[in-house]
Image (cartoon, rainbow, N blue to C red):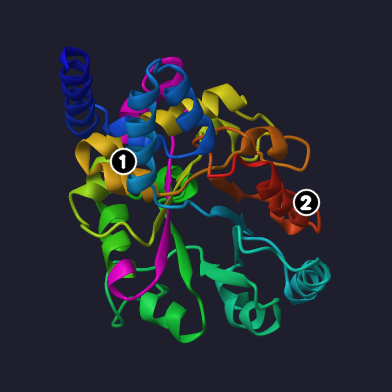
Amino acid sequence: MGMNMAMACAMLFLASSMQSGAAHISASLNGAAVRRSLVSTPNFAARSAMRNNIVANAGVRKFFVGGNWKCNGNRESIKTLIEGLNQGAPVGSDVEVVCAPPAPYLDYTRQNLRKDFAVAGQDSWVSGQGAYTGEIAPEMLKDIGCEWVILGHSERRHLPEIKETDKTVAVKTKNALDNGLGVILCIGELLEEREAGKTIEVCERQMEAVAETIKDWSKVVVAYEPVWAIGTGKVATPEQAQEVHDAVRGWMAKNISPEVAASTRILYGGSVNPQNCDELATKPDIDGFLVGGASLKPDFLRIVDSYKQAVVQ
């Protein structure tokens, strides 16, 4: 009887601890993280309770691969790229694919690109239509069939001609969501910030601005892109990328909610290519990629295929 009572008390303590102090365990939410947690819990009954709690709080994070074509191409080269992508095998239900062409080719891309790939704008304005020469209102993107928009990309944050602030990115995010678009929210540190040990601080600051502005994260995908790795050929090691993804998910669990942290996909971007994508995809908190230069080649389909390497959630 005493043993049963002790076990019951232990189980109550475990349940309480998981709800109040172990939100990040639930937020890790994939097979590898679950296995690590369970293996480190010696008692069978406790392991069962932990597993049931994690499963109950788990939202399935579908692998996501975005291709950012940036300011590249012309009508002919984009036609050729689309034809190459259209020749690929149909993608499975376990991966979501989005291509973001330059604004002049958005409508052409949506009309001609395979229908199992979505199309995204590369930016949108802080408000609706009006006297904003050169800007694109999110409802315009919706009108031509776009489902997503990339916001907060490092080139828009750091190019001296643009210099978007965290607040501007947050306002754009809210406006895009309010108009029915999904948002690929980019965060990431400069080389000097990484060398100063400020990587996590920078990412959390960028996330905080958005968290203060929106409430519903169901249509937000976060893309961690270390600025020093974008287009340089350098890539964060899988361990470096996982460390930051884990920290961002932990921040979300603490500052937004464990449920949002558990369900929000966090992508890696920064010189992703067919040679490194498989290893990156095996990391427990890497839920896909935002691809730059490699998305301009038919090899992009090989990166899409890396979802098969991801840990089954």
Report whether residue 227 is seen.
yes
What residue is drawn where x is 18% and y is 16%?
6
Q: Position of residue 272 (x, y in %)?
A: 67, 41
Give the residues in magenta.
Answer: 177-206
Tally the marks. Answer: 2
When the figure is inspected, residue 206 is found, relative to residue 42, above or below; the finding is below
- Residue marked by disc 2: 302
Inspect the magenta stretch and tell me whether residue 310 lies in it. no
Residue at disc 1, secondary structure: helix
The x and y percentages for residue 232 are 66, 34
| Quarter holding residue 201 | top left
- 310 left or right, relative to 247: right
Image vertical order of residue 17 relative to residue 87, above or below: above
Residue at the location (49% across, 39% down)? 30
**Which residue is depicted at the point 21% across and 14% down?**
3
| Mark linked to residue 206 | 1
| Residue name at image x 42 percent, y 24 percent | 37
Relative depth, front residue between 125 and 248: 248
Q: Is residue 22 left or right of residue 67?
A: left
- Within 10 Å of the Cα at label 1, are there few (<14), some (14-19), or many (20+) other Cα atoms? many
